[in-house]
Amino acid sequence: MVDDAVSALEQHFAQLTGAGSSQDVPSAPDWFDEAAYLRLNADVAAAVAQGRMASGYQHYRLRGWYEKRPLAIPSAEQMDRLVRLIPLGAENDFVGAGQQATTACHVEAVQYSKAGGLTIIGWVNDTSNPLHSIRFVATKWIYIFSASGMSRIRRRDVEAAVGTSASYSYGFFAFVFLESDLEITETPTIVFEFADGSVSETKFAVNQVDDVELRNLVIAYLAQSEFFGNHQLEGIRLLGGGIGKNIIAHNKNITAKILAGACAQYFGAPKKPLRGSIVICLYGRPEYFFLQHTLFSRREGFSDYELIYVSNSPELAERLMAEARAAQIIYDVPVILVLLPGNAGFGAANNVAATYARSDRIMIVNPDVFPKDLDWAKRHTEALDQLPAEQTRLFGVPLYYDDGTLMHGGMYFELDTGISMRHGEMVPQQLARVEHYGKGAPVDALQFIRSRPIPAVTGAFISVERAWFETLGGFTEDFVFGHYEDADLCLKSFCAGSVPWIHDIRLWHLEGKGSTRLPVHEGGSLVNRWIFTERWIDVIKDGLEGPQPTHPLLQTSESVASDATQQLEWSRS
Amino acid sequence: MKVLLISLFHPELVRGGAQQVAYELFLGLRAHPGIEPYLLCSIDGSLPALYKSGARITGFDGRENEFLFLSREYDYFWHRSSSAALLESFSEFLLLIKPDVVHFHHFLTYGVDLLTLTRRILPEARIIFTLHEFLAICAADGHMLRTADKSLCTKASPVRCHQCFPNTRPEEFFLKEMWIKRHFDAVDMFTTPSHFMIKHYTDWGIEPERIRRVTNGQENYSGGTVLPAATKKRNRFGFFGQMVDIKGIHIIIRAVEYLRSQGFTDFVLEINGANLRYASEARRKEIEEYLEAEGQKPLGEQIVLFNGSYTSDQLRERMSRVDWCIVPSVWWEIFALVISEAWMFGRPVIASNVGGPAERIRDDVDGLHFQVGDPVSLAHAMQRACTEEGMWDRLRGNIRPPPSREVMVEGFREVYIHASVDDHLGVSRQQRKSYLE
């Protein structure tokens, strides 16, 4: 009897909802809590008790979802993940339906991108009834943001409206990358669920944005948000709370799509086997292209090298093609121009460009690096030929400011300790930072420019065996736009057993200072510092902290090095 | 010997000293047995009718061996064209003519990187570069004037240049210097018409062995006869030249007003020139309003007359109307062809005491100096010129004949012959070797 009744009901609701068969009747979420459902729906519990319904689950499948019956508030394990719930029509909106909340809350913006980035921005006055979660209910799917995974930010406007001077973060900011092709076809419902089980529900139109736009919006919002306490520490703490990994995933999705559209153009061909491939990522500054051609080419030993430019700026593609053609006419240096349809970031752009190399050595060079030693290419080749392999597997060089002083001779790591305020407690928190040896030192400050093993070298110039670069997986592509990839690569090398070196081949580095940093760049920096700290803080603590690190690997390399390097003819001394 | 002269503009299309000298040299070389000169003159967007569709280098009005370079996509900061088609056409032009000597009189409108391209296309050719101003050193139109107060600049540096152009970072000036010097590496020999220029450029970094003085020269338009002075009084002054800011017409006008204010009005000033439209807005307004006001005065009170532009064949008539020429330039005037023109007609010159005029004119011997940019100093010199008995005859008597076209041709011919691969600097030999690899 029950089975017949169920079958009849299934057909009835299938017709009602337009579903073709009972196969289309929705399943309950996999976190469906039978006991809670019966507790929250007394009539269903009575029907089950009387044998009129087999279970709460059956009721939910047959009509509970349609009637928007309340489910239990999901536990922590049940939140922060996508639930494909109701593959039917628009009328199948699903909401949790507890009693109406009296807590003031407001959604201000909802952004969704094609690849599945979803952000909700708003505020909630939950000082007395804490927010438990926010459900984003689309036509065919639900995402539940846990309150603990959201960023809570300071909102002075809400403070003024509430009339409080208390240090309370009324604002919230939630972001998830779903990496799916889920569509939002109708205005979704957003449900605030509070600790006492009450809910507040609202319909809010979604602003569909481009993936890159959403990524930029999220990190810019992060950079511009106000927190109680140290902005960087609190921002990084929030990234660690869940948003960070979603930003990385979203960014990597963007990067992958950009790399899929890479296009390489060849200008000229090498006339002999090459000793190195100079990979240069342009940062939207096409003038560096012809400047580097002019200043690199026709110098002693340069014919052993090729130039591979990679452009992150699609709007410059045609100009760069013309520049490459002009450079071929004037300088006759083999060039590969790798054009990307968007900004893939420093790491990915260099990685993809390196795959086009026609030599077994990759030299990562910034576009604003120029030869100070006019015979730098010859010296570089001599270093490869004469130094022990472990000293040239991955090495950098001293870089100079245009005023003639040393910009730096290698990098080391520092750990900054700050105090984060959490629930009224002061919690020390450490962040990793990269520092430089010898900034502003006189030109011949040997202690900074002599050949030696060091913790890291700058990405403005890295010479690395191609096989080693590939073994290390190239640059890590988690970082947004670019920063820390060089130190990250060096630490990967270090942990794999090969210490970075620096050798005295002098170059200018005219690092731009004047460009305006936008909030999106500041946000990217925040994300990158969080990533770098997360990945490497334990390694740095283990003997790599400070300008005179004590790690045994560095000490061993130094002692082995001193004899060999002194005998080298190519050495400047 | 085939010589390709590369000139900024053609003097019959756009007037100017550098192009005048290049053209005089072209005419002089053409008359020289054993030399086959070619002239390539640039034009820019101000002469759109001369651009032919799809062409980058064309002939010029049916003239033998005279060509026009149709400049485009020019970057006035880096001094380069981004047009690959233009580079290809230039390369093709070089290969068609196969000159033994490529003599650049400018890189403006061409691109300084054409020096490197020329070296690559013609590794055995001698490349000569004549410096007509400081464009390689100074972003302020090559005048070496500080932009803030128009004072003379003696040394460029990344920070000093940034002070003149606050929107450009010092690093960019540092790079620009490296960029230009890198292309100058392709040059076998630099020439300049003045000694003081040699000092500026060697201080900047050109090796002393790689730069020589070769005077500017020109045809003697007087035909060898010196004009008599029309009156006993020597109180007629003339200005000849471009009416742009650096030529300093405003200094003369202010000197005239100073003398007026002092009650000294027994003199006349005739302004002969053109291109006031290229002066700065403020300067143009000042000069136009002054000339307008002067024209409103009763005829007997008018001191300053504006005669308009002139051509070489009008020089005789214009010079006959004055006793003195004034060269009031407020920049490092490099050579001042107008001094030569004045001397052709026996007219002593009163000039600013800097640069080429100071070098060419001997103060109180064959002309007078006054403090550059100082109207009162000029006024005193003018008053003295008008009133000092016998001075005009004395100075005129000491005037030396200006350098002729033939002297200039001979000077350059010597450079063409000796600036060869074998007797050049080691550094250049190395450079050339790299191009031949």
Image (tube, coloured by chain):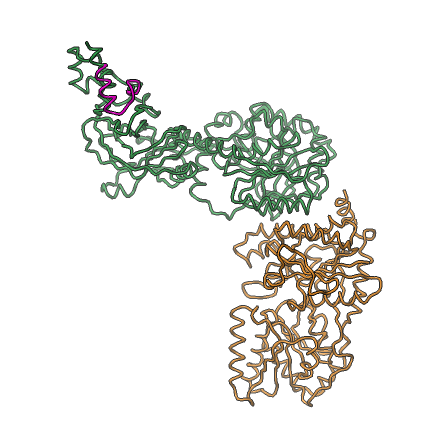
Q: Is residue A37 above or below residue B187?
A: above
Q: What residue do we see at 27% from left, 25% from top?
A: A18
Residue A69: % across, % down = 21, 23
Residue B200: image quadrant is: bottom right
What colour denotes chain A? green
Q: Is residue A227 left or right of residue B387?
A: left
Q: Is residue B186 left or right of residue A198?
A: right
Position of residue A213 measured from the top left corner of the image (x, y, whole percent):
41, 39
B23 lies above or below A441: below
Q: Which chain is orange?
A: B
Image vertical order of residue A193 relative to residue B311, above or below = above
Q: Is residue A437 visible?
A: no
| Observer able to see residue B414 | yes
The answer to whether residue A13 is magenta is: yes
In terms of secondary structure, what is the magenta stretch mainly? Answer: helix
Residue A565 percent coordinates (x, y): 70, 31
Front residue of B172 and A49 = A49
Point out the stretch of residues depicted in magenta: A7-25
- Judge by depth and name the residue closer to the eye, A467 or A544: A467
Q: Quadrant of the N terminus of chain A?
A: top left
Residue A314 forms part of the magenta stretch? no
Q: Quadrant of residue B408?
A: bottom right
**Toward which corner of the image does residue A53 lie, by quadrant?**
top left
Q: Quadrant of the C terminus of chain A?
A: top right
